Amino acid sequence: MNNQLVKLEKNDNIAIVTIDNPPLNVLSNQVTNELKTTFDEIANDSEIVVVILTGAGSRAFMAGADIKEFPQSIGQTGMKERVLEQHAVFNQIDFLPKPTIAVLNGLTFGGGCELAITCDIRIAEEHAQLGLPEIKLGIFPGGGGTQRLPRIIGEAKAKELMFVGNPITAHEAEKIGLVNKVVGTGQGMNEAMVLAKQMSGYSLQALSRIKKAVDEGTNMEFFAGIEREAELFEEVFLTEDVKEGVSAFIEKRKPVFAHK
């Protein structure tokens, strides 16, 4: 029986997912499968409002795919199906109807960088390095990097990172909008918890619709996006949480949302 490589713990309304595949938490087939199972569980757990994703230790968030699994794919047809299975797991994390925070606590390369950008918010510890070095192997990012990265940092900068393949520092990543915040080594989880606790006090009904409106709207023409926002806004006014939020404001008290 293989050791479990993806750990899930719950802290009130916050789920903490840790990839523990020493020494560098690489994205093996087992890690991919366990991420799928873990995020299925999170999606179906109505008590979880916010998710934090990180790597065990302080060397790597995830240093890419497991290159040792590559030789079996060279020269083989049918690779597209396998790649799309990987995409399905990353899409599952990307479109999870709950906010997600990645804590980058070390090397965040290749598939690790692609996994990080499936999350809504990225907090990097100052020793972290980010990069897409696939070009150096004669391949290119195949975990959604060519699609997600330009949407986050713009086409020109994304192409530069992928064409050249060199890593950048956490501070450089912050400057180009690839990470939201840089904190000291060892401080990433504390910072993520502060943010997650604040968000988990809000209504998941509203949080999930913000995420939906942004994710869907990014791929729509502007006025179609505005219309989608209006539909979701109408939906949120049918929830129990909106009654609680408005009543609490009028009564000058802190709202207690039931996420319904």
Image: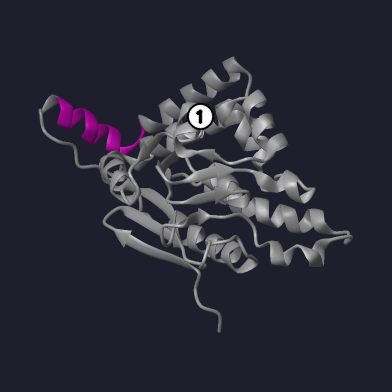
Residue drawn at the location 37% of the way across and 47% of the way down: 50
Colour scheme shown: one colour
Residue under numbered circle 1: 214
Residue drawn at the location 64% of the way across and 57% of the way down: 65
Q: Considering only vertical position in the picture, is 177 above or below 41?
A: above
List x then y, in percent, for residue 178: 51, 34
Q: Which one is nearer the viewer's eye here, 140 or 221?
A: 140
Residue 244 drawn in magenta: yes
Residue farthest along the bottom direction in this orientation: 1
Residue drawn at the location 72% of the way across and 52% of the way down: 84
Q: Considering only vertical position in the picture, is 187 above or below 7?
A: above
List x then y, in percent, for residue 14: 32, 53
List x then y, in percent, for residue 38: 49, 62
Quadrant placement of the N terminus: bottom right
In the image, 6: left or right of 246?
A: right
Quadrant placement of the C terminus: top left
Q: Is residue 30 visible?
A: yes
In the image, 103: left or right of 92?
A: left
Q: Rate crowding at label 1 as few (under 14), some (14 to 19) or many (20 or more) other CA atoms within 10 Å.
A: some
Q: Is residue 95 visible?
A: no
Residue drawn at the location 31% of the way across and 44% of the way down: 196
List x then y, in percent, for residue 48: 35, 53
In the image, 53: left or right of 156?
A: left
Q: Quadrant of residue 46?
A: bottom left
Q: Secondary structure at mark 1?
A: helix
Residue 236 drawn in magenta: no
Residue type at mark 1: give it.
Answer: Val
Q: What's drawn in magenta, residue-wise?
A: 238-249
